[in-house]
Image: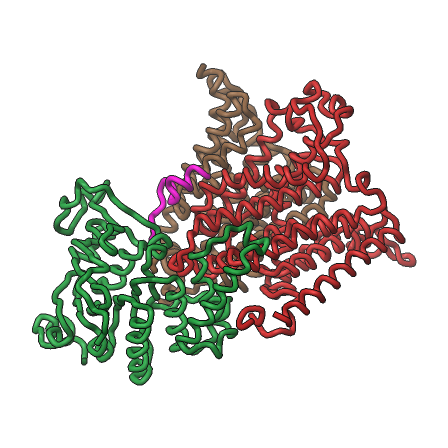
Chain colours: A brown, B green, C red
């Protein structure tokens, strides 16, 4: 029994870790702007394409940091161009803008690639096959959870123990007051997008080692799932996002193991709806009340 | 001052406690508002006055206590779940055996309690006329099909006439087609009252109706409240900070401080009450 | 009342002229021409956009489930109308399928709406308690679940799994030569009904909920009841819209009803103006005309003289298009019409109410 499930569990932990890296971006942005950044999944896809095109012209050790830098720049630009002008607009407008950006990025990527799926380059370290118990898997399966945990720990330290981290916490509690206290809101928001995009870029390096075809819409589904993970863990909580993502990754693969592959995506959304109905603040979220 | 005053209670709060987490916002409040009276609820900022309104109108579910309306319980609750341990009020097990009764605000409005809001809440994309018209929606007999196919023409006409009539009564007929939020402040307050009246209430709750008004406007408002009370055979329960207004038109006054009732009586009694002066009037210049 | 009547007559004459123009264009340009395609698809999208506007623009519920309800409507229509003789071929992997009867096009369109409305009623019960962006993501999730279920092998005899549904009556073969007229009539009736609803006491209640939920509830408006009503009615028309889209496309596959379809419709609603029916209609035709026709040249690699025009390549059209949309979203947030209607222009705001 365990032997047959082991490969699925490993795959679950691995993909869960990759979702976690994307989910961090959602949860940080939501925590500060109360915005579901619908374009985040497309930024993740863009990171995949950056790698495809960079490897063709520069050596791999150089390509990896470049991918991260380019993705960060993209995330930064998206925020400055599409969200910043709407700071005082109703929340619905910003969400619509996010959907617009997602639409634009997808169309842009389709145009650049001509709509063809691109083969993701082989990253030598990560693609190596290894043997764990009775299961054969790629090294990335082991690297992902370790790297994810390390990054999440680092991020939590950053948020709890640095000045910018303190500013981020302040802004997430009260936007206007922190502005009055002299916090440069726009810088804090930019940093948030930069961290989120960097995480998404690292996530894409790991993700595409397993799913090697990059298409313009490939990021939509992992993006949505990562968002669900963020809600599940309690939106705004980084460890929550990680745990939510791991649970979703594992459940999804166990469902595949049970032969219900068609429902593995649907499961995620069913989980989302159940969470929203019974515990809208997620596993680690804090409760807020409206004032009349 | 009012002609149809009686001793029949319209609204009765019994041992109402409202606790948010560890904060007890209202502690064991009991009060009565009788048919035809104008009763004022006063107290310093943060005393829990609006919270009391919210408990009556179904916005909040009080942690403990009973609200009766025309002798029928519309809210009954006792500490449940986590609150059993956390409960910081008194009389916590008085209603242990009563079945909790909860209603959503719309249901309470149906029963005949209408309210206005401290921070005016008009429908901002609608005209003054449309704002009042929406208040007539709850007494409709049409369903969405008959309304869509215009089989409710008679009712629709009656609704419009009623809304227009109300606007005339509150003196806003000339601005019926102006956007509600473009009206001056005082008119917005009147419009909110007209909108509340459109729901055919027997009890009207006014949350700081004179807030932001100058003395002359406040005086006019006082007369206006007495007028509509008599005209629509209402009972009025209001929160107000303008002491002149309160003393002028109230039959009785309840004073709330830190969630507790500290005094009750006629305006004369309240003005002389040393506890009130210490807690409230002493702090305030008035 | 008199003024209102005059306005109504002018509007009806205007609509009749549009219908006549649509007919005329089809008869002169031919059913296969680009302009007719735009008229057909634009009308279908107009209905879907107006149905979404009823929810997002008029009731203030940010729902992203439209593609799911369109899918339900499209499948209901196709499943019920595939001719008996063709069923064996369509459902070749499922022994001809479970459904062994066929109904007419108009009843099938109605059923499409009703089935979508039933789904909405079921889904609405839990999700309409959620607020704002949580509602958006939950409805988006439900649309994805519906799409997964439809493709589920076990109910393949009903839905044909992930295979195409085809050979059902399409726009081209039910009123040959008058496809535009047919589409316009169905869409016109539906939008007319939505307009009547919006201008009734229920429509006013919807707008009250959009403006201020707390105040609406204090006015005795049952929030859940009214939100559910808007949700179900919107889905009913989205279902009919989906069925019309199936008729336009000629064949049907669940995978085309992705969330990106919902996003497209949302963007149409935004371009037209949240809370404006006429805005949604205009934006739909504009959107379809641009994406299917006017911007086509951007996709063709063009050589002028000896120089190849830079950038022009397949896909460039959609890039330009989405940039334009972003400009609207960022700088013209009210869209074409804001929350006003074409027939209200020139009259003082709200003059339709008041004394009569």
Residue at 20% over, 56% down:
B13
Residue C152 % position (x, y): 60, 27
Q: Return the residue found at the far left.
A: B274
Work out whether residue C52 or residue A172 is closer to the camera in this orientation and state it: C52
- The question of residue C151 being in magenta is answered with no
Whether residue A286 is situated above or below residue C200 in the rendered picture: above
Work out whether residue A20 or residue C13 is closer to the camera in this orientation and state it: C13
Residue A96 can be seen in this image: no
The total of numbered circles placed on residues is 0
Whether residue C71 is situated above or below residue C269 in the rendered picture: above
Main SS of residues in magenta: loop
Residue C201 % position (x, y): 51, 58
Q: State left or right for residue B107 relative to residue C310.
A: left
Residue B274 can be seen in this image: yes
Locate residue B40: give its quadrant. Answer: bottom left
Quadrant location of the C terminus of chain C in the rendered image: bottom right
Q: Which residues, given as a range, are shown in magenta?
A: A273-289
Residue A247 % position (x, y): 43, 32
Q: State left or right for residue B275 relative to residue A26.
A: left
- The question of residue A278 being in magenta is answered with yes
């Amino acid at each position: 029994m365990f032997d047959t499930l082991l490969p699925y569990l490993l795959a679950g932990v691995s993909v869960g870790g990759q979702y976690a890296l994307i989910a961090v971006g959602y949860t940080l942005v939501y925590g500060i702007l109360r915005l579901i950044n619908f374009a985040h999944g497309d930024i993740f896809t863009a990171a995949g394409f950056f790698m495809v095109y960079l490897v063709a012209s520069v050596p791999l050790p150089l390509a990896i940091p470049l991918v991260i830098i380019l993705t960060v720049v993209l995330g930064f630009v998206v925020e400055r161009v599409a969200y910043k002008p709407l700071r005082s607009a109703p929340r619905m407008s910003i969400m619509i803008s996010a959907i617009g950006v997602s639409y634009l990025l997808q169309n842009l990527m389709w145009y650049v690639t001509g709509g063809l799926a691109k083969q993701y380059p082989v990253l030598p370290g990560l693609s190596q096959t290894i043997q764990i118990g009775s299961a054969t898997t790629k090294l990335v399966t082991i690297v992902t959870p370790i790297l994810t945990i390390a990054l999440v720990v680092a991020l939590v330290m950053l948020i709890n123990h640095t000045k910018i981290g303190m500013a981020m916490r302040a802004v997430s509690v009260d936007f206007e007051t922190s502005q009055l206290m002299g916090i440069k809101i726009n810088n804090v928001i930019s940093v948030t997008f930069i961290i989120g995009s960097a995480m998404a870029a690292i996530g894409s390096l790991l993700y595409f080692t397993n799913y090697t075809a990059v298409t313009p819409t490939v990021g939509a589904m992992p993006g949505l799932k990562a968002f669900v993970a963020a809600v599940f863990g309690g939106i705004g909580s980084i460890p929550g996002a990680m745990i939510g993502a791991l649970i979703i990754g594992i459940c999804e693969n166990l469902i595949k193991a049970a032969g219900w592959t068609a429902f593995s995506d649907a499961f995620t959304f069913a989980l989302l709806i159940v969470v929203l109905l019974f515990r809208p603040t997620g596993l680690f979220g804090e409760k807020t009340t409206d004032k009349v | 001052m009012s002609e149809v005053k009686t001793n029949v209670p319209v609204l009765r709060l019994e041992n109402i406690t409202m606790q948010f987490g560890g904060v007890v916002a209202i502690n064991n409040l009991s009060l009565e508002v009788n048919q035809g009276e104008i009763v004022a609820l006063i107290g310093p900022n943060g005393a829990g006055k609006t919270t009391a309104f919210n408990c009556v109108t179904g916005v909040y579910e009080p942690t403990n206590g009973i609200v009766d309306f025309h002798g029928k319980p519309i809210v009954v609750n006792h500490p449940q779940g986590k609150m059993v341990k956390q409960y910081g009020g008194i009389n916590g097990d008085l209603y242990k055996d009563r079945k909790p009764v909860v209603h959503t605000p719309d249901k309470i409005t149906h029963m005949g309690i209408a309210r206005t809001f401290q921070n005016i809440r008009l429908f901002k994309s609608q005209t003054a006329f449309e704002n009042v018209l929406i208040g007539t929606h709850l007494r409709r007999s049409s369903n969405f099909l008959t309304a869509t196919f215009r089989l409710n023409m008679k009712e629709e006409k009656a609704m419009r006439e009623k809304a227009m009539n109300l606007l005339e009564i509150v003196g806003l007929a000339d601005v019926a087609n102006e956007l509600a939020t473009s009206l001056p402040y005082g008119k917005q307050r009147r419009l909110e009252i007209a909108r509340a009246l459109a729901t055919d209430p027997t009890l009207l709750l006014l949350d700081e109706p004179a807030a932001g008004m100058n003395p002359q406007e406040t005086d006019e408002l006082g007369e206006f409240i007495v007028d509509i009370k008599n005209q629509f055979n209402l009972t009025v329960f209001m929160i107000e900070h303008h002491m002149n207004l309160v003393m002028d038109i109230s039959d009785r006054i309840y004073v709330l401080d830190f969630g507790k009732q500290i005094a009750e009586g006629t305006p004369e009694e309240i003005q002389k009450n040393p506890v009130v002066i210490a807690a409230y009037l002493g702090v305030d210049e008035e | 009342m008199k003024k209102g009547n005059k306005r109504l007559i002018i509007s009806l004459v205007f609509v009749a002229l549009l219908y006549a123009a649509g007919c005329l264009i089809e008869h002169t340009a031919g059913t296969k021409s680009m302009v007719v395609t735009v008229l057909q698809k634009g009308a279908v999208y107009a209905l879907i956009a107006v149905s979404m506007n009823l929810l997002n623009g008029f009731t203030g519920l940010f729902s992203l489930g439209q593609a799911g309800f369109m899918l339900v409507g499209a499948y209901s229509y196709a499943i019920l109308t595939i001719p008996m003789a063709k069923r064996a071929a369509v459902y070749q992997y499922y022994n001809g399928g479970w459904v062994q009867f066929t109904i007419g096009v108009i009843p099938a369109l109605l059923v499409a709406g009703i089935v979508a409305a039933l789904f909405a009623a079921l889904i609405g019960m839990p999700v309409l308690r959620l607020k704002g962006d949580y509602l958006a993501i939950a409805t988006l999730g439900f649309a994805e679940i519906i799409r997964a279920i439809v493709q589920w092998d076990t109910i393949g005899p009903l839905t044909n799994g992930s295979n195409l549904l085809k050979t059902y009556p399409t726009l081209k073969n039910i009123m040959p030569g008058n496809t535009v007229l047919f589409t316009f009539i169905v869409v016109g009736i539906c939008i007319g009904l939505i307009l009547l609803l919006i201008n009734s006491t229920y429509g006013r209640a919807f707008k009250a909920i959009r403006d201020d939920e707390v105040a609406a509830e204090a006015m005795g408006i049952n929030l859940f009841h009214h939100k559910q009503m808007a949700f179900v009615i919107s889905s009913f028309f989205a279902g009919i819209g989906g069925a019309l889209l199936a008729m336009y496309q000629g064949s049907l596959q669940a995978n085309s009803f992705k969330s990106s379809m919902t996003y497209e419709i949302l963007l149409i609603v935004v371009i037209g103006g949240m809370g404006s029916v006429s805005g949604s209609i205009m934006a739909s035709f504009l959107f379809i005309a641009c994406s299917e026709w006017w911007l086509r040249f951007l996709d063709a690699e063009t050589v002028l003289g000896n120089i190849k025009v830079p950038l022009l390549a397949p896909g460039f059209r959609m890039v330009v298009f989405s940039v334009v949309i972003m400009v609207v979203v960022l700088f013209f947030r009210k869209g074409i019409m804001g929350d006003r209607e074409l027939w209200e222009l020139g009259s003082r705001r709200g003059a339709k109410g008041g004394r009569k």
